[in-house]
Image (spheres, helix red, strand yellow):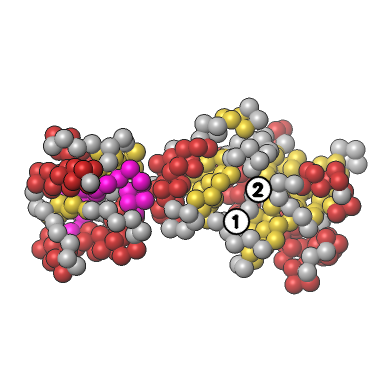
């Protein structure tokens, strides 16, 4: 059985192989949310059980949540060698200094495991094997005795890595071989294994486990745990982003927008007890979504505290790139403190949802008329 990259990376990381921070998305909206939570440029990777996805357009970069939404929408549903992309891995974009290739597999002819390693990794490794096979180091560990760290360091030395990388590279090779043995694998591969300012990192991962050995590895199923979204985001066709703390309140705000002749661009439920950080994240999500002309933030504080909302709004406005008008309805727990914080920052607010919704629609109409 071959595992998707995201699962293979969980296993590799569990065995001590460093990986990039990453989360799984099943929709463009989830990709946008994850990108916003991570707050850094990301790489968006199709999760398929076939090779060649990079050349097929299944790996792309995004510098902000808005780009992540577009890229995810392009990749999801595409076919790569006959396999439809149903989910994505969203990872932090690495600062890559060099790329390497390391794999452990079974040499059927030799009837033993073989380690292949090269100073050149990435999408061109198959061409390298054909045109310059001498650049790929081949090593046969003895399957009847323990594979020792010094053997892995010798492979690294033969690869030709700089002296300061021999020990770290050897450590990665040794750990990858241990994964191969422990999980009864046919193949355990890192391509590329990248050198970054933070050290060596598995930028990709491939794991194929022998089917007849799966009964010994039920724990692999338990690794299907993904980071829960902090907010629920749905992309709509309008131009007024609607944010609320609770699904019912958000839907009511959307109804008020439509009642006044506007069209919602988003449904974004930040849930009960939303923190300053969640407010900041939610605003950054909708502010990076290009169709949005006006934001309507509708908060009726219960568990959610109005002063946390106010501070989150100010934080988001301090570093947002797009200047989009925000209409705020703020009332409930700690409302006097929250309203005071907004007033001192020069940000207007309403306590009536009806008035706030009407104001949002009027602002949007003014902007469209210009």
- For image coordinates 55% across by 32% down, the residue present is 78
- Return the mark for residue 323: none
Percent position of residue 14, x then y = 60, 54
Is residue 285 among what the camera can see? no
Residue 100 lies left or right of residue 44; in this view the side is: right
Left or right position of 363 against 178:
left
Which quadrant, please, contains the N terminus? top right
Q: What residue is shown at x 23% (from left), y 43% (from top)?
A: 368
Note whether 145 is above or below 84 in the view shown: below
| Residue 364 left/right relative to 31 | left
Residue depicted at 23% across the width and 36% down the height: 263
Label 2 sits on residue: 205
Nearer-the-camera pick, 327 or 12: 327
Regarding mark 1 in the picture, which secondary structure is present there?
loop
Image mark for residue 19: 1
Does residue 68 sit above or below 171 in this rendering? above
Q: Nearer the viewer, residue 262 or 311?
A: 262
Would you call the spot at circle 1 few (<14 residues within 10 Å), some (14-19), or many (20 or more)? many
Q: Marks 2 and 1, how far apart in space?
A: 9 Å
Magenta residues (range): 284-306
| Mark positioned earlier in the residue sequence (2 or 1) | 1
Crowding at dot 2, Cα within 10 Å, few <14 / some 14-19 / many 20+, comes out as many
The part of the image, by quadrant, that contains residue 31 is: top left
Expressed as whole percent of the image width and height from the top left, the position of residue 29 reads 40, 41
Identify which residue is drawn at 63% across, 60% down. 96
């Amino acid at each position: 059985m071959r595992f998707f990259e995201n699962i293979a990376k969980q296993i590799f990381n569990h065995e001590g192989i460093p990986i990039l921070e990453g989360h799984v998305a099943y929709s463009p909206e989830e990709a946008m949310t994850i990108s916003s939570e991570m707050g850094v440029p990301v790489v968006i990777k199709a999760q398929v059980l076939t090779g060649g996805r990079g050349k097929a357009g299944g790996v792309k970069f995004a510098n902000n949540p808005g780009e992540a939404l577009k890229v995810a929408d392009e990749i999801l549903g595409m076919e790569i060698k006959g396999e439809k992309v149903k989910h994505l891995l969203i990872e932090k974009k690495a600062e890559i200094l060099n790329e390497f290739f390391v794999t452990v597999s079974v040499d059927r002819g030799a009837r033993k495991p073989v380690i292949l390693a090269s100073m050149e990794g990435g999408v061109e490794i198959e061409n390298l094997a054909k045109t310059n096979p001498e650049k790929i180091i081949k090593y046969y560990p003895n399957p009847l005795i323990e594979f020792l760290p010094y053997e892995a360091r010798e492979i690294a030395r033969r690869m030709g890595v700089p002296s300061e990388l021999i020990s770290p590279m050897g450590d990665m090779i040794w750990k990858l071989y241990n994964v191969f043995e422990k999980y009864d694998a046919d193949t355990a591969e890192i391509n590329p294994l990248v050198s970054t300012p933070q050290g060596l990192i598995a930028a990709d991962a491939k794991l194929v486990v022998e089917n007849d050995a799966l009964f010994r590895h039920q724990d692999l199923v338990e690794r299907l745990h993904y980071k829960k979204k902090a907010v629920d985001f749905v992309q709509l066709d309008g131009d007024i982003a609607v944010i609320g703390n609770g699904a019912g309140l958000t839907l009511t705000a959307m109804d008020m927008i439509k009642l006044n002749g506007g069209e919602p661009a988003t449904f974004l439920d930040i849930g009960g007890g939303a923190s300053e950080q969640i407010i900041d994240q939610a605003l950054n999500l909708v502010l990076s979504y290009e169709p949005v002309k006006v934001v309507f933030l509708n908060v009726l504080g219960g568990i959610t505290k109005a002063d946390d909302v106010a501070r989150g709004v100010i934080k988001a406005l301090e570093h947002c790139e797009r200047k989009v008008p925000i209409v705020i309805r703020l009332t409930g727990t700690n409302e006097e403190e929250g309203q005071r914080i907004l007033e001192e920052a020069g940000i207007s607010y309403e306590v009536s949802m009806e008035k706030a919704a009407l104001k949002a629609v009027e602002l949007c109409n003014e902007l469209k008329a210009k």
